[in-house]
Image (cartoon, rainbow, N blue to C red):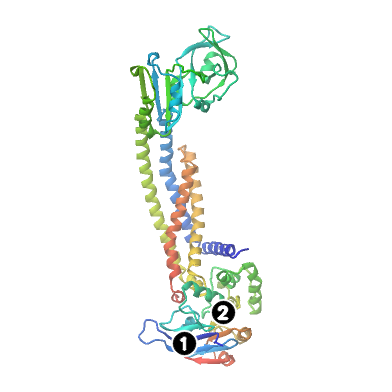
Amino acid sequence: MSAGLRRLGGVIREALAAAASSPIASIATIIMVAGLCATVLLTTGRTVGAEQAVLGSIDSAGTRTTIVRAEPAAGLTSSVVTRLSTVDGIEWVAAFGPAFDVTNTLIPDGTKVAARFAYGAHLTSIGIPESSALPGSTAWGTALSLGQLGLVDHAGSVTNQSGANYPVAGQMDIPDWLGFLEPALFVPRAPVEPEPVAVLVVVAERPDLVAAVAPAVQSLLAVDDPTKITITTSEALAQLRALVQGQLGAFGRGLVLLILAVSGLLVAAILTGLVTLRRKDFGRRRALGATRGLIVSILLTQTLVLATLGAALGSGVASMVLAFSGDPLPGLAFTAAIAVLAIAVSVVAALIPAVVAARRDPIRELRVP
Amino acid sequence: MPALLDARDLTFGYESTVPLLDQWSASFNAGEVVAITGPSGRGKSTLLYLLGLMLAPAAGQVLLDGEPVQSLPDRARARLRARQFGFVFQDAALDATRTVLDNVLETALYRGESRSEAVPVAEGLLERFGVQLRSEAKPGQVSGGQAQRIALCRALLGTPRILLADEPTGNLDPASSDVVVDAFHEHADSGATVIVVTHDPVLVERCDRSITL
């Protein structure tokens, strides 16, 4: 075993022994850190969970979308998708042609559903493969549209009023922000010549980019008659989202900082008390040859071990309480971040008492009765 | 050839106008057991701490193998204390929360030695000095004499070149004292210097020489 590993093993053994030899201070430290984590998770964590739920609801309404509706006279074509594919800040774009009614080929008098030609490379994200056996003539439907057409097993075909037949290849899942196209049946196409487009959906990478993306989209539409175009953006929703996130986030951050500061002070106070009680111990160690660095290492390792136990305990208990009470959980990343922060604050809080202990005059401490 | 340990013109006082030690000098050679005697309050223990690099003198130097060591950085002095010196404090200064074996093994960590390799040596020392206890026994369960012998075992674990002992036989019966003094001579014969602060005339008599403060 290398000298470094041997030293590390020795430090850990001494730290564990020191923690075991001061059970009251050790338990107090564990409870303090556990309380810190539990308090943060039960207050800010609950807020974060609620914030995520609220933001999720807002996002499902489409906080990043720009929707362009074009009348036939506008002259909007499928080539717009290619032009928009080079714009920064756009995550998803697709164009849809004018709606045309289709029915189940086997039930000509059945329910009519509005089908649309769909254009764009991002259609794969809603379950439509990039290529199919019959390119340009295969249809994909949502559960709602396929149900209405009586194609519950996703097999069969649909026929339009002109008699054109489109085999149904499968079911697709569309996000909430395409919900306005329901009941949706898309026929993906990659035409050589531009085809007319009635609806263009553009999704920005972030809600705050909507305000910048919308004008860019407008400038690249290249339509014949701009008066026949209607553009709807989610900018208002994005602003609401930012407001909700900002207010809840600021509240949470403030509370976390306050709790961390108070807990850090209490951990420092506990360790200062512990160091004072064990003055003679540290004096003996120094007199017998322990370096200051070793004394600091032992105390910080002791705090690290106790704080880790406390963080695990507090996080576990708080997560169980939230789960049992039916409150939204703040998520693993937030929980882990709070635990790591609590441990870090404890170790930093222990640093000053540890350095004080290491810098004391060994003989003066040994003579403490 | 320089003395193993040299004190040159040491001056020291505890916040008092009259220093306990005023330009005090002495040399300690390998192979000898030296007693330091004198009335209480004359600075015998303080001298031991100065020689053991635990206290810094107001003036003067401590030399190890002819090299001044008092002015070394704290880390270097701590390493010297761990590797070159052994200490037996007047009150044993054991850790009451740890087992007897852990107390003897304490300095192995400071020297960076393997605990597993040090355990049989520690057990051998405990047996030699007649401290055969349950492995989980703690200092609170032993007598003053046993505590002093445990402290001696701790001091001898690293076979230090300089052994400093403060009233090492103060709590011992004559038979145990003899064992301890024999151990001092045996250790000195291995090339070390043993410096003992004592009021015990029998111990002084058995030392190679004595210095009175």
Q: Secondary structure at mark 1?
A: strand
Looking at the image, which residue is at 53% across and 13% down? A149
Residue A133 bears which disc, if any?
A: none
- Residue B199 in view: no
Across and down, in percent, residue A86 comes to 44, 30
Q: Earlier in the sequence, mark 2 or mark 1?
A: 1
Q: Secondary structure at mark 2?
A: helix
Across and down, in percent, residue B104 comes to 59, 73
- Residue A18 in view: yes
In the picture shown, does residue B159 fall above or below A154?
A: below
Q: Are marks 2 and 1 on the same chain?
A: yes
Residue B88 vs residue A348: left or right? right
Q: Nearer the viewer, residue A100 or A350?
A: A100
Q: Which residue type carries mark 1? A: Arg
Classify 10 Å Cα crowding around label 2: few (below 14), some (14-19), many (20 and above).
Answer: many
Q: CA distance from mark 2 to mark 1?
A: 30 Å
Q: How many marks on residues?
A: 2
- Image quadrant containing the N terminus of chain A: bottom right
Give me the chain letter of mark 1.
Answer: B
Classify 10 Å Cα crowding around label 1: few (below 14), some (14-19), many (20 and above).
Answer: some
Tell me which corner region of the image, top left, top right, bottom left or bottom right, holds residue B146. bottom right
What residue sits right under mark 1 in the picture?
B8
In the picture shown, does residue A226 fall above or below A246?
A: above
Tell me which corner region of the image, top left, top right, bottom left or bottom right, holds residue A181. top left
Q: Nearer the viewer, residue A225 or A174?
A: A225
What residue sits right under mark 2 in the picture?
B148
In the picture shown, does residue A240 fall above or below A348?
A: above
Q: Which residue type carries mark 2? A: Gln
